[in-house]
Amino acid sequence: MLVIATSDKGGTGRSVTACNVAYQRALLGHDTCYLDFDFGSPTSGAVFGVDEVYHGVESGGLHHYLQGQVTEPQRIDVWRSSSRRELRARRSVAGRLVLFPGDLGGGEFNMTRDVYERCVKLLIRLNEEFGLVLIDLSAGRSHAAEMLLAVTADDELRRRNMEARWLVFHRWTRQHITAAADLVDGRSGLVQVGQDLGYSEGSLRDRIRFVRTAVIEPDSAFARGLQATQQTWLREVNSNLNDRAIQLGLGRSVVIASIPLDPVLQWREQLLTDSDVQDDVANKETVQAFQRLAEDIETGDTWSRP
Ligand SMILES: Nc1ncnc2c1ncn2[C@@H]1O[C@H](COP(=O)(O)OP(=O)(O)O)[C@@H](O)[C@H]1O
Ligand SMILES: [Mg+2]
């Protein structure tokens, strides 16, 4: 299964959530790989705690592979390479967790026929090797996003029954909701470009779900710590945001996850492990939300027509 993570804006929590979901998915026993397609800002090494690829690799990452500079992209065994002790200890009980990093100082490049074919070849191969292939795109409309729409609408992938699913990440604010809706439905958005590239509108929409990140639910423990006036205000804003989300087609039926605002992630981009929760620095609810998404990313119910 291919899952493609995208967002209209940067700083939505897309990469941090996607890395945590990949981690939880591997902990469930599924072989999982993470492809850093955010060529301008490949930060997944930092989130996984792999210090030597903090901001991508010197050479031989996905960027270079797609451009034909190497025949195989570099792979990193996260269990073995993470600087976090808990990860190294979990290795034997989990599925594989492999990071395909981007290259340092990458950036956008032209998606030629050769690039396209290398991408198809890689995805077909990784899909056979891993239960989940999670691809993290850059923010906004990018050449890479367009290429992945083309690739996943491709007959070859359909013939092989390769399912692609799209997760659109956004924060729970007015601007972010509007931007996420525009990325899907606006001019040159996913739906329009996807149709130009061979998707039918219905089949593409069936494959798109939204992920709300860093959300403060009015009934959460966090909100209960606010002053009464702030709680009232939060309730009202939250209700307005819900109305707006429904108006723009981002209502509950198309939301696959809502990840709570977490104090640890607010200050550091990282995986949340059991020990972060046991030490009472990260919230249990956040980890549970990642776990649920790691399960729901596959289950039929979540993806049946809303
Ligand atoms: N659930 C969350 N609660 C609080 N902060 C978060 C949460 N998820 C992500 N963040 C923080 O938001 C910032 C942007 O996240 P990141 O994943 O890098 O965004 P993107 O990939 O969309 O650009 C990071 O500092 C990250 O740690
Ligand atoms: Mg990112």
Image: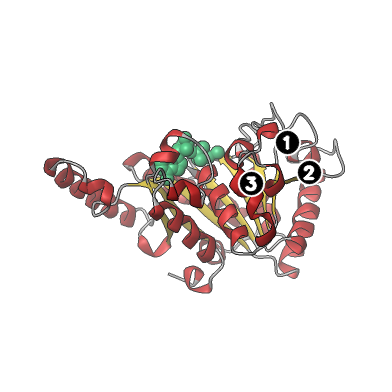
**Disc nearer the start of the sequence (3/2):** 2
Quadrant in which residue 258 is drawn: bottom left
Left or right relative to 164: residue 305:
left
Question: Around disc 1, counting alpha carbons within 10 Å, would you say few (fewer than 14), some (14 to 19), or many (20 or more)?
Answer: few
Task: Give how far apart the Cα atoms at labels 2 and 1 are.
Answer: 8 Å
> The disc labelled 1 sits on which kind of residue?
Asn
Q: Position of residue 131 (x, y in %)?
A: 68, 64
Q: Quadrant of the C terminus?
A: bottom left
Task: Give how far apart the Cα atoms at labels 3 and 2 are.
Answer: 12 Å
Determine which residue is flagged by label 3.
146
Is residue 32 visible in the rendered structure shown here?
yes
Q: Position of residue 234 (x, y in %)?
A: 21, 45
Determine which residue is flagged by label 2.
115
> The disc labelled 2 sits on which kind of residue?
Val
Left or right relative to 220: residue 52:
right
Q: Residue at x 53, y 60 (%)?
A: 294
Q: Position of residue 291 (x, y in %)?
A: 49, 59
Question: Around disc 2, counting alpha carbons within 10 Å, would you say few (fewer than 14), some (14 to 19), or many (20 or more)?
Answer: some
> The disc labelled 3 sits on which kind of residue?
Glu
Q: Position of residue 130 (x, y in %)?
A: 72, 61
Depth check: give the residue in front, 28 or 18.
28
Q: Residue at x 87, y 43 (%)?
A: 71
Determine which residue is flagged by label 1.
110
Whether the residues at callouts 2 and 1 have beta carbons within 8 Å, the answer is yes
State whether residue 303 is above or below residue 267: below
